Amino acid sequence: MSSPGSTVYREALLVEITPPWDTIDSGVAECVSEAVRVAEERGAVLLIKVDSYGGYLDAAFTIGDRLYYAKTLTVAYVENKALSAGTLIILPVDLVAARRGSVIGAMQPVIVNPVTGEITFLNESKIINPILRKAEVYAERAGRNTSLIRAFITEALTVDSRKAVESGVVDLEVTGYDELLGILRNYSLTRNNVTYRLEISRVEPFSCSFRSRMLSLLSNAYLANVLVSIGVLATIFALVSGRLAILPLTIALILLGLVGTGLNPNVVSVFLIVLGAVLLAVELFVLPGFGVIGISGIVLLTLGFTLLPMYIPTGAVPSEEYVTALRAFVIGISITLGTFFGLVIFKVIEAKRAKPYEYTPRGKIGVAVEDIKPGSPGFVKVEGELWRAVSTEEINVGEEVVVLDVRSDGVLVVKKKT
C-alpha cells in the first residue's frame, strides 16, 4: 500500500551477475535489461547480486543506463567483488550493500589482446573523460561520492567495503546476503523527495534467457577466435574437397564467431533462420532421403531461433508472447526432427556396417510336397517356403524331412526319424 509521496515494495526480483556468468558482456546486459523490465511490470524491487571482475565497457554502459532510467527501485549487493565494470553498474542503483571484506573500484579501462592476453592500460583523455563523466552522472543519481569514483578510474584505486561506506560510495556494509534480506524487510530511503518503504517478504530469482547466455558465450574473445578459425578452415576444406554440403555449417561457425567481434546477433539470427529453412525445404522437396543438408537446416534453424530476441520493444506485431511461443515451438520441432533423423541415420550406418547375414534352411524341418527319389529331385516346404530338394533315399509326399545341406542343385534332405 502507498501514501502520497511514498511507495511500498513487498516483492523483489533477483538477478545475479556471479560466476560462471560474471563477465559483464552483451548477454549479461540483455539479461539485466530484461529483468528491469519485468520488475517494472510487476512493481517489484530489482535486486542485483554482483560478484564480478568486470567486463566490456559498452555492456556496462547498457546496464548502467537501464538502471539509471529504471522506473522501479533498485538494490545492489556486492558479494565478494565488483571491480571495473562491476563498480560502474552499481553506481546508479538506489541502494548499494556490500558484504564485509568485499572490494570495489579498479575502474581504469584496459584493452586485452585476445591472442596474447596482453593487457594495456588506457590513459588517453579522449577515452577517460567520457567514462569519468558517465560514472559521475550515475553516482549523482543516488548522491554518491564522485571524488572517490574519479580515483577509481584515473588511479585504478580499490577500496574495501568499510572504506566504501565511509566514503559514501556504498550505503550499507552487511555480513552476508541473509542480513541484507533481513534489512530489506523493514527499510526506508528517500530519492527525489519520494520515500520508499521496503517490506520485502518474497524474493524471486530471475532466470536469464537461453539467448542471453548464448550471447555471453559468443562474447568470449577466445571462443570467438576459435569458432572463426574452425569455420574458415572448414570452409576451405569443403571447397577444396568438393564437399559443399557442409558449407552452411562452416558459414554458421564463422557468423557465430563474428558475433563476439561486434556483429549484430539479430542479423545473424535472421540469416540462420532463412538459410536453415531453405536447406530444410531443399532436403524435403528436392533431394531424396534425409542427409547432411537436412540436418544442417535443422541445426541452423535451432541456432537462429535461439538467437532471436525475446523482447520486441517497438510493440509491433509479432508480440513478445508470440515470438516466445514460436521459438519454443520451432526449437521443440527441431529437437524432435533432429532426434528422429539422427536415429534413422544411426540405424542406416549400423546396418551398413553390420556383417552380411544369409538365411539358409540348414537343420530345419519341412514337408515333402512331391515324391523325391535318388536322381529325381522334388520340392519341399520349409517354414512356408518352397525349396528344390534332392535326396539319397525315397521320400513320399507328406513325409517330414530334415534339411542337411544347401547345394547348387537344391537342398539335401532326409526323412525325419521318428
Image: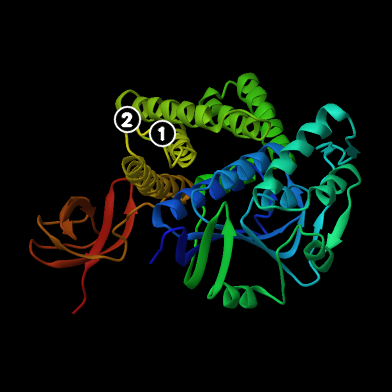
Relative to 103, is 179 above or below?
A: below
> The residue tagged with tag 1: helix, strand or loop?
helix
Left or right of residue 394: residue 10 = right
Front residue of this view, candidates 106 and 70? 70
Report the residue at 71% width, 48% height from top: 139
- Left of 255 or right of it: where is 11? left
Three-letter amino acid code of the residue under disc 1: Gly
Q: Quadrant of the C terminus?
A: bottom left
Quarter where residue 250 is shown: top right
* Colour scheme employed for the rendering of this structure: rainbow
Asked if marks 1 and 2 touch (Cβ < 8 Å), the reply is yes
Label 2 sits on residue: 284
Is 316 placed above or below 310 here? above
Query: Front-most of 364 and 22?
Result: 22
Residue 275 versus residue 106: which sits nearer the camera?
A: 106
The residue pinned by badge 1 equals 294
Image height of 35 relative to 248, above or below? below
| Residue 237 picture quarter | top right
Q: Nearer the viewer, residue 31 or 220?
A: 31
Residue 45 x %, y %: 50, 60
